[in-house]
């Protein structure tokens, strides 16, 4: 963890150091569990907007949003539905990419 960040709602919490691993995510979610309900709502709204910005929701995006919401003890906002065929194609693409590694 690095310095501190003051939210637009006036809360101060540690700033995560650059990284993209599971440990960093876990540490960030531990901190975010202690912020106010209003701050959690703002975070989830921002995350949802980010997921929806390109007009489609991938399986990893939906799962990350679900994980963040569950970790914060907040309901997941509704996201546009996709056809089962779209989800199946996305899952096949992910599995194919994993096999290539």
Image (cartoon, rainbow, N blue to C red):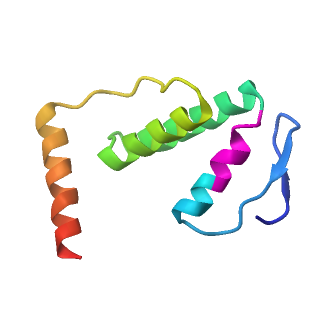
For residue 64, above or below residue 27: above
Identified at 50% across, 36% down, the residue is: 48
> Which region of the structure is painted magenta?
27-35
Q: Say whether residue 50 is left or right of residue 55.
A: right
Q: Report x, y in % for residue 85.
A: 11, 37
Q: Say whether residue 19 is left or right of residue 79.
A: right
Q: Nearer the viewer, residue 100 or 85?
A: 100
Q: Nearer the viewer, residue 50 or 100?
A: 100
Residue 53 visible to an observer of this rendering? no
Residue 46 visible to an observer of this rendering? yes
Q: Report x, y in % for residue 46.
A: 59, 38
Q: Quadrant of residue 88?
A: top left
Q: Is residue 34 magenta?
A: yes
Identified at 24% across, 76% down, the residue is: 101
Magenta stretch, main secondary structure class: helix
Q: Nearer the viewer, residue 49 or 78?
A: 78
For residue 29, above or below residue 70: below
For residue 62, above or below residue 93: above
For residue 37, above or below residue 32: above
């Amino acid at each position: 963890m690095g310095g501190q960040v003051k939210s637009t709602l006036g809360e101060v919490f540690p700033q995560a150091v650059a990284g993209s691993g599971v440990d960093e995510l876990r540490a960030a979610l531990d901190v975010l569990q202690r912020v106010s309900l209003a701050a959690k709502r703002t975070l989830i709204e921002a995350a949802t907007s980010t997921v929806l910005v390109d007009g489609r929701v991938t399986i990893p995006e939906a799962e990350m949003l679900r994980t963040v919401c569950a970790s914060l003890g907040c309901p997941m906002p509704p996201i546009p539905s996709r056809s089962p065929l779209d989800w199946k194609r996305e899952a096949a693409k992910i599995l194919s990419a994993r096999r290539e590694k």
